[in-house]
Image (cartoon, grey):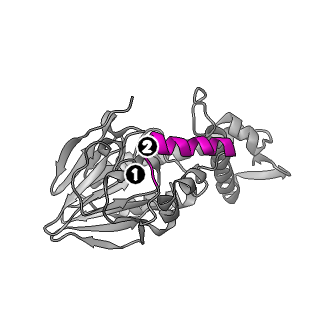
Amino acid sequence: MLTTGYTEAEYGGVTVLVGAERGAYPYANSVLVRGAAETLVIDPSLSLVEFAPPSDLVLVSHAHEDHVAGLGRYDVPVHGHEKDLAALRSRAVMAAAYGLPPDATEETEAMLREQFHVRDRPDASGFTDGTVFDLGGRTVTVVHLPGHTAGHCGFLIEPDGFLFVADIDLTSFGPFYGDVGSSLPDFEASLRRCREIDARWYGTAHQKGVVEGATEFGRRLDAFVGVVERRDATLLSYLNEPRTVEEIAERRLVYRAHVEGPHVRPVERRTAAQHLSRLMGSGLVAEVEEGRFRAV
């Protein structure tokens, strides 16, 4: 049975609404920002399903179920990046974005509806990189950080110096770029952009919570990036003889062997294809015959 409710943690004028299990999936951490004129909530999670703090508008970092589960509590303007807007407006589009077989897509849509309370928000409007929401004495600026999804965003809250980086979550699982609209090159560019933003606090959507200081954030970001590098190394080692994408997917770069579900093979296949593309571009892997790849 899922747990609702949250605890509050204050960072200047920013309140993090910490979800159950420190925001581990299926939960997430939401953010409440109060200005002199308006208040907004970022990523209303499952923890806000039964009780949600009042807000004048809602911002969504990206169109994944754990970041919008509490959205039904808000009959106020909702904003998301224009590249994720279709999935935010339609539950069916959100389910299709996972790129699963048809029967699994139907089950996923049912899960979004029943477990995460996701409903269509045709009223949602789009923002772009650099859009500023002025709450009166406090601003929230959109920082487009694509890769996880095409429209994935962070938010810089000033004058507090709080950067919410959403699913650049610094966990040991590492970056996730296995959906249909995901991109490893974009994710890496977003990680580099995060390093360029000097903030006092860096807030994540999941277990790692809030990190204080650019130095500590950079150290943890290095470890996060290291997961991608280990996936490269694992793949290069496995390609000591010619392999197909299907064989690489079976070997797995993302999930451990005990993890099962209809999502595993499609995610592994898309992830493998992206790593192959980058290693071929670096001259470390070649297609030695049609559909078969080997380390050079």
Give the residue drawn at x 26%, y 38%.
Answer: 5
Bounds of the magenta span?
102-119
Mark 1: which secondary structure?
A: loop
| Image quarter of residue 132 | bottom left
C-beta proximity under 8 Å, tags 2 and 1: yes
**Residue count near mark 1 (Cα–Cα under 10 Å), binned few <14, some 14–19, many ≥20:** many
Does residue 149 show up? yes
**Residue count near mark 2 (Cα–Cα under 10 Å), binned few <14, some 14–19, many ≥20:** many
Q: Which residue is mark 2?
A: 116
Q: Position of residue 6 (x, y in %)?
A: 25, 40
Please, what is the three-letter code of the amino acid marked with disc 2? Answer: Phe
* Quadrant containing the N terminus in the rendered view: top left
Q: Which residue is mark 1?
A: 68
Q: Position of residue 270 (x, y in %)?
A: 65, 49
Please, what is the three-letter code of the amino acid marked with disc 1? Answer: Val
Which residue is the extreme one toward the top? Answer: 258
**117 part of magenta stretch:** yes
**223 part of magenta stretch:** no
Which residue is the extreme one toward the right? Answer: 289
How many marks the image carries: the answer is 2
